[in-house]
Amino acid sequence: MQLESFLAPTAIIPRLTVNSTRQLLHTLAKAGARETGLRERTIFQALMAREQRGSTGFGNGVALPHARLRNLARITGVFARLEPPIDFDAPDGRPVELVFCLLSPDQNDALHLAALAAISRRLGRPNLRRALRGANEADAIHALLTDQEHSQPEAA
């Protein structure tokens, strides 16, 4: 699954300053509402409910908040680079600065899991994380996330 199939250039927030996970999820919900046409409150509540079941921070400064939503027509992503990073209760204890929010239709488990796996693989690459941390423009971040060169395995 290719990220460009569900991440629009308009869904990139290149420099976001927030003070808490709650504020971050609220901002992601607002961007998600713009991209999907769903209500911001609906998205925020779904993201908060998922986060309350356990942190979606997965280490190396990356978090992957996600929610499955009724009445969502298509899978949608929102990406934000945080300045400064915030605590996200990640397993490695590192603050989070790269956040990929995934919104999926609630009726398709396989699609949701495939998208989560694709994002995890992509953001698991150290060279891509370094490049994303240095990118300051939405277009540059979108290009990095959707570039096929960065989807190839790194040499050991």
Image: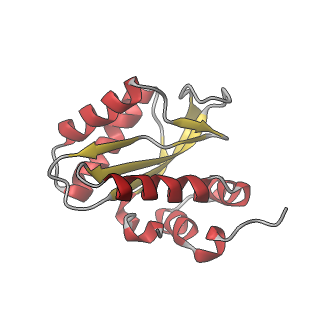
Asked whether residue 144 appears in the rendered view, the answer is yes
Asked whether residue 13 appears in the rendered view, the answer is no
**Residue at image point 36% right, 32% down:** 50
**Residue at image point 25% right, 41% down:** 43
The answer to which of 140 and 54 lies nearer the viewer is 54
Residue 134 lies, with reference to residue 93, above or below; the image says: below
Residue 118 lies, with reference to residue 86, above or below; the image says: below
Which quadrant: the C terminus?
bottom right
Q: Residue furthest front?
A: 110
**Residue at image point 33% right, 51% down:** 109
The answer to which of 53 and 150 lies nearer the viewer is 53
Residue 76 lies, with reference to residue 57, above or below; the image says: below
Give the side of residue 34 with respect to residue 131, left or right: left
| x and y, in percent, of residue 71 in the image | 14, 52
| x and y, in percent, of residue 111 in the image | 36, 59
| x and y, in percent, of residue 12 in the image | 42, 57
**Residue at image point 31% right, 59% down:** 75
The answer to which of 79 and 123 lies nearer the viewer is 123
